Image (cartoon, grey):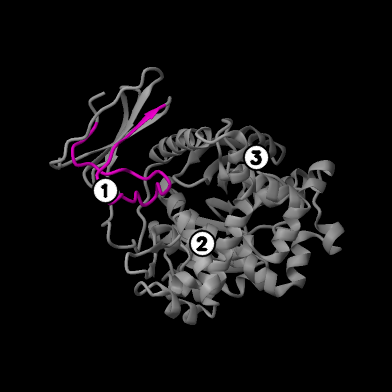
């Protein structure tokens, strides 16, 4: 098809945000319908062969380490954007945000690659691999709990030194690392020392976008116990938490401070992932006063205000939650631009905002409570303000999407749900609001924009 680039390197779709480049110059021909991705830049010296399959649509995936990324559907070029490259020898300190269209194209590519990978194994083997997912996540949790990525942050270490640093049995640690390395988490150098990969780097506690808290929460004994009862939620359509814990989800968190700490760290991990993409994907500059409803310590609000220097902010959450906000706001340099208020969004919401932001709030609640929250926001917003819901809007396609799994989590924990755009439109309508558009970002989160009806 003429799109192989001499001297190119494979673009790895498993890390679309950082666009990690492989060390070897290779090209991949995919005999499937899908998306082609090509880095169009300075050419190297080694020519690459082109193969056309006997049937099907040939999509060619090529990459070069700079200049322009081209997205193809068949022979039609859909998109050309600057590269988001990094040096092959270092772990990035700050990920750049690709356009949402590029992220969706990469997701489609990953889907077709995964289907190809899955189809190359007999169905029983592929099913065994699927069911091993619980083991993999538990191994990742152990790595996060032991702080292995933190121990390797400065330099690679031999097994005995690594085991000593993380307080683990050397032989057991070797077996754990062997399994994780097979999934791309950590690497082993030729001299035997263990080091970080881009995936492992996300488990550092101080990584710019750290997934350590998320991994520890997902693998915690309490969370595993909850998911072991998923069948009961599927049978009844209701949460298992009251029957198991004797109280509702948020009441249980309030009574188990250690588990609540894990949960909060996990939510921080997701916020770190979403913050940059939401701010890059949606223009907050038209809003002079932004009220963050249920905004926790104000991380997202601080990021929005940093990107919109003329705006002022109001942070609103439960009193014991916002008590920890001033330190973060001070650290982010926006403390003098934010008014902090404590209260419950079921009772009222601060008035006077030009925009009201609710990130990952509505998905926590069944429809009746969700409408009640939106009515409180509507009452405060008046006739002219904009309401912005930041949620993982479920797509209509049948490809994988993190929100589809989060939807089961919501059912399990709170009888709540993730929703499609049509479901959000209906929910907003019940609260007297009119959905005007849904703005996708490079992450699974979208911005749902609404106005008073």
Residue at far top of view: 55
Instruction: Choose mark 3 or mark 1, whichever is in front.
Output: 1
Up/down of 89 relative to 1, above or below: below
The residue at the point 34 percent across, 49 percent down is 19
Q: Name the residue beneath numbered marker 2.
A: 211
Marks 2/3: CA–CA distance: 24 Å
Marks 3/1: CA–CA distance: 42 Å
**Earlier sequence position, callout 2 versus callout 3:** 2
Indicate whether residue 10 is drawn in magenta: yes
The residue at the point 38 percent across, 42 percent down is 99
Indicate whether residue 24 is drawn in magenta: yes
Q: Which residues are magenta?
A: 4-31
Q: Which sits in the foreground, 421 or 426?
A: 421
- What secondary structure characterizes most of the magenta part? loop
| Location of the C terminus (image quadrant) | top right
Q: Name the residue beneath numbered marker 3.
A: 419
Q: Residues within 10 Å of mark 3 (few under 14, many from 20)?
A: many
């Amino acid at each position: 098809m003429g799109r192989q680039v001499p001297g190119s390197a494979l673009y790895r779709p498993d890390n679309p945000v950082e666009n990690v480049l492989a060390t070897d110059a290779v090209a991949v021909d995919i005999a499937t319908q899908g998306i082609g991705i090509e880095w169009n830049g300075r050419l190297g010296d080694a020519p690459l062969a082109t193969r056309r399959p006997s049937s099907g649509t040939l999509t060619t995936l090529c990459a070069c380490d700079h200049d322009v990324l081209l997205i193809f559907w068949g022979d039609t070029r859909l998109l050309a954007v600057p590269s988001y490259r990094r040096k092959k020898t270092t772990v990035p300190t700050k990920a750049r945000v690709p356009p949402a269209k590029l992220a969706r194209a990469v997701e489609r590519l990953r889907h077709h690659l995964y289907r190809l990978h899955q189809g190359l194994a007999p169905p029983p083997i592929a099913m065994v691999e699927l069911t091993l997912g619980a083991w993999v996540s538990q191994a990742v949790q152990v790595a996060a709990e032991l702080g292995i990525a933190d121990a390797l942050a400065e330099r690679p270490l031999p097994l005995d030194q690594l085991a000593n640093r993380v307080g683990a049995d050397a032989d057991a640690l070797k077996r754990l690392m062997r399994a994780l390395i097979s999934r791309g988490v950590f690497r082993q150098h030729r001299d035997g020392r263990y080091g970080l990969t881009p995936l492992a780097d996300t488990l550092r506690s101080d990584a710019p976008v750290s997934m350590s808290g998320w991994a520890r929460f997902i693998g915690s004994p309490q969370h595993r116990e909850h998911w072991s009862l998923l069948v009961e939620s599927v049978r009844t359509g209701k949460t298992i938490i009251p029957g198991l814990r004797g109280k509702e989800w948020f009441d249980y968190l309030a009574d188990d401070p250690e588990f609540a700490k894990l949960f909060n760290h996990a939510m921080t991990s997701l916020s770190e992932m979403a913050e940059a993409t939401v701010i890059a994907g949606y223009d907050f500059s038209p809003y002079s006063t932004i009220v963050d409803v249920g905004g926790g310590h104000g991380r997202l609000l601080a990021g929005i205000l940093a990107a919109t220097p003329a705006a002022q902010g109001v942070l609103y959450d439960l009193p014991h939650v916002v008590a920890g906000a001033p330190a973060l706001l001070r650290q982010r340099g926006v403390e003098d631009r934010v008014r902090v208020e404590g209260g419950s969004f079921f009772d009222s919401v601060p008035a006077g905002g030009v925009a009201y932001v609710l990130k990952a709030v509505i998905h926590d609640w069944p429809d009746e409570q969700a409408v009640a929250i939106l009515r409180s926001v509507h009452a405060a917003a008046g006739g002219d303000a904009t309401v912005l819901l930041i949620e993982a809007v479920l797509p209509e396609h049948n490809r994988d999407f993190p929100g589809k799994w989060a939807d089961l989590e919501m059912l399990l924990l709170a009888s709540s749900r993730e929703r499609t755009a049509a479901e959000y439109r209906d929910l907003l309508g019940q609260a007297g609001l009119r959905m005007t558009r849904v703005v996708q970002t490079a992450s699974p989160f979208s911005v749902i924009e609404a106005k008073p009806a």
